[in-house]
Amino acid sequence: MMRPRFNLYLGASLVGVWVLVALIGLAVTPYDPLDMNFDTRLSPPTFHYWMGTDQYGRDLFSRVLSASSISLIISLVTVLIAMSVGCVIGAIAGYLGGIVDRVVVVCLDAIMAFPPLLLVLIFLSVAGPSASAIIWALGAAFVPTAARVMRSTVLSIRETEYIEACCVVGSHDTWILWRHVLPNCVSPLTVLATSMFATVLLLESALSFLGLGVPPPRATWGALLADSRPFLGQAPWLSIFPGIAISLALLGVNMLGDALRDYLDPQQRQASREGL
Amino acid sequence: MWQYAIKRILLTIPTLFIASGLVFICVRLLPGDPALLIAGDVQDEAALDAVRQSLGLDQPIIVQYGLWLKNMLSLNLGISISSGTPVVDLIVSRFSVTAQLVLIASAIALVVAAPLGLFAASRHNTRTDSVIMITSILMLSIPSFWIALLLILVFGVELKWLPTVGYVSADENLLQAVRFMIMPVLALTFVVLGQLTRMMRSTSIDILGKDYITHARAKGLSEAAVLRHHVFKNAFAPTMTLMGMIVGSLLGGAAVVETIFTLPGIGRLMVDSIYARDYPVIQGSVLLVGTAYVFVNLVVDLLYPFLDPRVKL
Amino acid sequence: MAAIGVVGCGQKVPRSSDVKSEIRIALQSDIRGTNPGVNRDVFTDDVLLQIVETLVTYADDLSVVPLLAERVERSQDGTRYIFHLRRDVVFHNGAPMTSREVVWSWERMLDPATNWVCRVWFDGSQGLKIESVTATDLYTVEFVINRPSVAFLDLLSNLQCSPVILHPDSVASNGDWIAPVGTGPFKLDEWMRGEYVLLIRHDAYRIGIGERNGLAGNKEPAGEVFRGVIIPDPSAAKAALLSGQVDIATRLQVSDLVDIEAATNLTVFKRESLDWNVLLMQSARPPFDDRLLRQAVAHAIDFSILAEVVSGDVSQPNASIVARSSSEHISCHQDRYVHDIEKAKDLLSRSGYEGEPIKLITNKRFANMFDNALIIQRMLIEIGLNVELEVLEWTTQIDQYYSGDFDLMSFGYTGRTEPSLGYKAILGPKSENAFYQWDSAEAMALLNQTETELDPGNRRSMFCRLHAMMLDEAPLINLYNNYIIEAASDRVIGYDAHATQKPRLWGVSLSTAEGEGGE
């Protein structure tokens, strides 16, 4: 079918490029992204500086490269943390049910009542800015989402499996439920992971923009955009290139996520079989 | 059904209670002393203590929280440490600005997205559909604050058509209000449009694959009628749900766009007040945004059965 | 000490009917209150300066000249000051100013119940005490202080908490503050919190003769209505200026220079401020308890590049506490550290530094502090110091400044016009207050002497010695005086910037091309 494949190819290639660039960026960049050169400040893109320079004479291309690594790592680790912690909580709540479930749901809702930006802001204000603090803060902000999804998945599986299991097996129902829960979670969780990844990346950029991201002089894409603001008229390249980078990365992740969702969603597969 | 509704509504109360308590504690964990901000220039301990006393910061936390709670129930959220205005007035006026921004942007997005998504679904697997699909994913992938910067660059700096900063409220001067709001609204609409179109399209495609659609066609209904009567109504519900969630999250999360355009919105107020350690304002604004978010989700949840007849409570 | 920002909102654009006759100035922050010296910050001071006045104030060259007083006499022993008041001063409520109101104002300020922020300067807790303020006749007031104080008149002129003369109508009978009834060229007409402050001309203001002279001289108001529009975001302020939404903007950024200098309808004013940028080093604990390390840092920094890049070439390097725009900045204060990387590396190797990580604290609220930190970090890495930036919120940084909890800190001080006041901000026993940067008994003794030394020549050489001691000891490193960038559109005439970075709205009016006002 044309659509998912197209999504898949374009999405995967964009993400692939990003990962590749990020890996390269960790090892080598044309210039040291932190190196200042006061003679070539605010230079437009030239042969020497492919994306131009900023107000301290730092090469923008190198900075965009190194930012790609940082953004990738932060988003990835955040999603991993949020998913692992959230899934454990959600599974426990969904599985145990009853009062435990109720309490957990109310607590999760309480945290989800905060705009994620605010949660992170407060966390970072208390913990001080650092890459690890941001990861923990963002991770914590998304734990409720992961927990909720896991919980409803577990609940729906429990509904279907419980009836069979209870009558047939008896004391082994725990093990079987466990055996059945995990495989059935893969699909919704994968979908969740990709959409969460995109949201985290976006939120991290927004935080960096507000000055709460990874501390300077290392930069993430959001911080590069924020730094470009006073020079919007004089040096538009400072805003254009980082923005393109974020957009392409997000585009890739979103397309990949869409393709995965199409693949894993049974309704969709049904439709494709009917040749629609 | 009413039982469910009431239960849902009642559940929000402990949620908000816990949320407000959490904020209260977190805010006081923030390093930095508001008294220093006010009197810091002068380096005199007695003066600082006097300021702390006048702000009520010398009491134990439980007492402070109790006082705040008691006042909150009579809608007295205290006085802003930075500006001396009553918090209630402040957050209400700021919230209305954000609400205007978010609702207008979402409404425009919805009006365009719904038919567009439906149209794309009806042209599924053609080039038109692919174009619309890719465009909508592209639109939702671009950060709204980058779009904001680009808009300022093009319309504000280069062409000089639109003012880049400030805000005029609609009841003061409608024409000016529109001029100031065009770019912020556009920046938000862009992204929301992508999200809603994608949702509408994928839901419509799902529905088009259903049996009752085939039956309707077999009965002789025109394609347009099928789309109108069956697909649209059913696809609209999940799209509305999504819009509800988007509105809810934007109410608090539009802080960056508000900062760029210096709109006096509640997102920016929250961020600014955290920087200024203005405890009453932080608490009040978070409470308001949290309540709004919970409320919007509640409304969407409760309206769902009306929008989607398949769902029964 | 640097200014502190507060919560601000976007500004409301004025109604079109008001636009023609009023002059709009961008304010970086809302005012904290209207009670001078009680609920204040630097932005509040900017606005209140148009409304209230002091007995003496600063001239263009930052010397102290009479304002509400006509002339000042000082007794031989330096403990009595006699102020002969002007007779043509009228309050905003029409009442004439006499010695009665001057005494009332001072008694109120010195009363602990008023919470006047600078009371401690005059009540003996820092040495100086005003023993009495009495009216010897209708237009004469006598101050008696406990010991001679060279800085006394400076303290009376100070801009951080100006001891202004108010009319008793400013306060209710139960002592509650109402509104400032002052003597200044403008009256506070309206204050819409978070939006704007509206000032209107005080028509009964005394007729001005001669020229404007700093904050004194001819202060006659020319324009009728001034609207202070609150625009906290610096990019927004620049945009508002360029688009004509405001006519005057003070406190502009270096990054704005290109755009505003390119604009054909703007006049740009660039001055060096009294405020100064500084790199603090915590000498109370390792690693910066090691003098060789501190000196290594001092020689690693290229001050010319720093000043040029961060201040847009507005400021020159200045290693002295005494500001370059001050008349006290004589040639000995030009002495500074030589930028010598080899020497820095040599000092570093001889010091006890072993490569341990060092945190350089800065914040994003003040662009100059941030930029300084960013560039200094590169320069220190170049000589082999393992320096990391720690970007804190301003409030947190202030906490750590007060507690002395830092290794390196990029900081800024508000300008003092009197050298002794500048040194007093940094020189003192750390055991008493952790915020002191320089703990040296010898220097403190010398500073105390300057406060009572009445001979200007002797004083100057004392300050020269202090400066030399400071360079040698290197407790902190002064970088350069901050920059002032202000701009006014051609819609107004008569505006000019001043080294105190205070806006002066008197003498400013709409240019005649607008068909209104003008001189």
Image: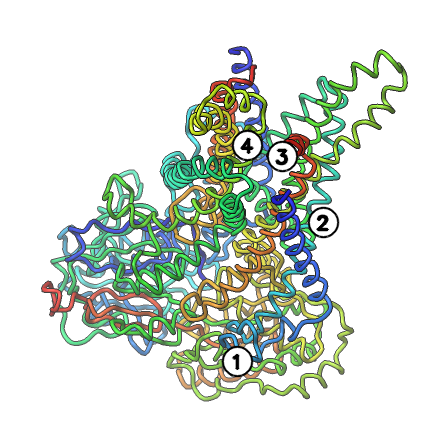
Foreground: disc 4 or disc 3:
3
Residue type, numbered disc 1: Thr
Residue at mark 4 to residue at mark 1: CA–CA distance: 53 Å
Taking depth in this image into account, of C392 and C289 the one nearest to the observer is C392
- Classify mark 2: helix, strand or loop: helix
- Classify mark 4: helix, strand or loop: helix
Q: Which residue is mark 1?
A: A40
Question: In the image, is residue B141 above or below residue C480?
Answer: above
Neighbor class of circle 3 (other Cα within 10 Å; few <14, some 14-19, many 20+) is few
Q: Position of residue A226 (x, y in %)?
A: 51, 60
Colouring rule applied to residues = rainbow
Q: Earlier in the sequence, mark 1 or mark 2?
A: 1
**Is the Cβ of the residue at disc 4 closer than 8 Å to that at disc 3?**
no
Q: Which residue is mark 4?
A: B203
Neighbor class of circle 2 (other Cα within 10 Å; few <14, some 14-19, many 20+) is some
Pick out the residue farthest to the left: C515
Query: Mark 1 vs mark 2: same chain?
Result: yes
Q: Residue at x 25, y 63 (%)?
A: C247
Q: Residue at x 39, y 69 (%)?
A: C256
Residue type, numbered disc 4: Thr
Q: Position of residue C472 (x, y in %)?
A: 61, 82
Q: Is residue C201 visible?
A: no
The quarter of the rendered structure image containing the C terminus of chain B is top right
Residue type, numbered disc 2: Val
